[in-house]
């Protein structure tokens, strides 16, 4: 009973700090039970600070669209400044999707490591759905390692042109450790040109066939050669000639005669 009275007192103190107009609107749109439940799980001071920095409509949307358990965890894991920045920078539907798909502790780690501005830049550039799909494939710690080993602009340029399936295929086949090596060796623009020319599937097949070091050494060797692009053969013509030859061979190839089976004589029974 004492805990209930303390919670009710916290609700009134919370509403009093917001002023009559804002507190009335929030109480009207959320209802007393939701406020009572929330103030019992989140420190009153944090709720007051957050609500003062947000409009009443945003507060109502936040509480209605994000499950209470997740919202409580979001507030606990993230600072007021980061939360307010995320709320102001993303549509509420996107914020609700992120909160349900990425653990709040991971979002906090992302913001603390890269900064809230860079975190939002990554989410917006890649798109919310793609960001969520990728972070389901690799842990947040591995993603942050990848950012550190390359850099944000290079990683965004690389991942932006790769589909989610391409990324999944690469991660499952080769992992993420080789990507910084390839990007640093070729440069991001050249890496993108190779992917565009070969496609991810063929690029992976080439890596599997040669190995990473051998492929890099072969690329280095080819780069030192003085090759004349005018001498590049027309592969379409070569392909057509090969097809004509193969068709001609098929026509002239003698058919094997299949021996006829001898019919068995049926002896009539006397």
Image (spheres, helix red, strand yellow):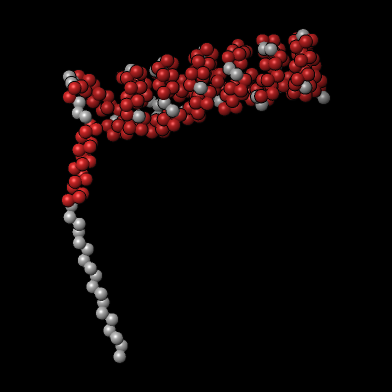
**Residue 111 pos. (x, y %):** 53, 16
Is residue 103 or residue 130 the one in the foreground? 130
Total labels drawn? 0
Residue at screen point 25% across, 74% down: 263
Q: Is residue 248 left or right of residue 212?
A: left
**Residue 255 pos. (x, y %):** 20, 57
Residue at screen point 18% across, 42% down: 245
Q: On the rendered image, what quadrant is the N terminus found in?
A: top right
Q: Is residue 211 left or right of residue 80?
A: left
Residue at screen point 71% across, 14% down: 56
Q: Is residue 256 left or right of residue 180?
A: left
Residue at screen point 79% across, 21% down: 32
The quadrant in which residue 156 appears is top left
Q: Is residue 207 left or right of residue 76?
A: left
**Residue 71 pos. (x, y %):** 65, 22
The quadrant in which residue 116 appears is top right
Judge whether residue 179 can be spotted in this image. yes
256 lies above or below 265: above
242 lies above or below 166: below
Judge whether residue 45 can be spotted in this image. no
**From this viewpoint, which residue is outermost toward the bottom?**
270
Q: On the rendered image, what quadrant is the C terminus found in?
A: bottom left
């Amino acid at each position: 009973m004492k805990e209930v009275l303390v919670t009710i007192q916290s609700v009134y103190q919370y509403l009093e700090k917001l002023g009559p107009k804002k507190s009335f609107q929030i109480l009207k749109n959320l209802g007393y039970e939701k406020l009572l439940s929330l103030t019992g799980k989140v420190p009153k001071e944090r709720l007051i600070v957050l609500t003062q920095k947000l409009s009443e409509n945003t507060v109502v949307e936040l509480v209605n669209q994000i499950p209470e358990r997740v919202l409580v965890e979001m507030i606990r894991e993230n600072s007021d400044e980061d939360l307010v920045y995320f709320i102001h920078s993303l549509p509420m539907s996107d914020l609700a999707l992120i909160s349900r798909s990425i653990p709040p502790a991971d979002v906090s780690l992302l913001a603390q490591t890269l900064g809230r501005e860079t975190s939002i830049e990554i989410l917006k550039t890649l798109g919310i759905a793609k960001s969520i799909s990728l972070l389901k494939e690799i842990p947040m710690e591995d993603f942050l390692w990848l950012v550190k080993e390359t850099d944000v602009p290079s990683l965004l340029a690389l991942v932006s042109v790769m589909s989610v399936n391409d990324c999944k295929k690469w991660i499952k086949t080769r992992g993420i450790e080789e990507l910084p090596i390839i990007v640093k060796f070729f440069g991001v623009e050249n890496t993108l040109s190779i992917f565009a020319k070969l496609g991810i599937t063929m690029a992976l097949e080439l890596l599997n066939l040669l190995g990473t070091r051998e492929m890099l050494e072969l690329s280095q060797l080819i780069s030192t050669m003085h090759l004349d692009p005018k001498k590049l053969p027309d592969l379409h013509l070569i392909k057509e000639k090969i097809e004509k030859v193969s068709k001609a061979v098929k026509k002239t190839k003698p058919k094997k005669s299949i021996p006829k089976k001898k019919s068995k004589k049926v002896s009539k029974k006397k």
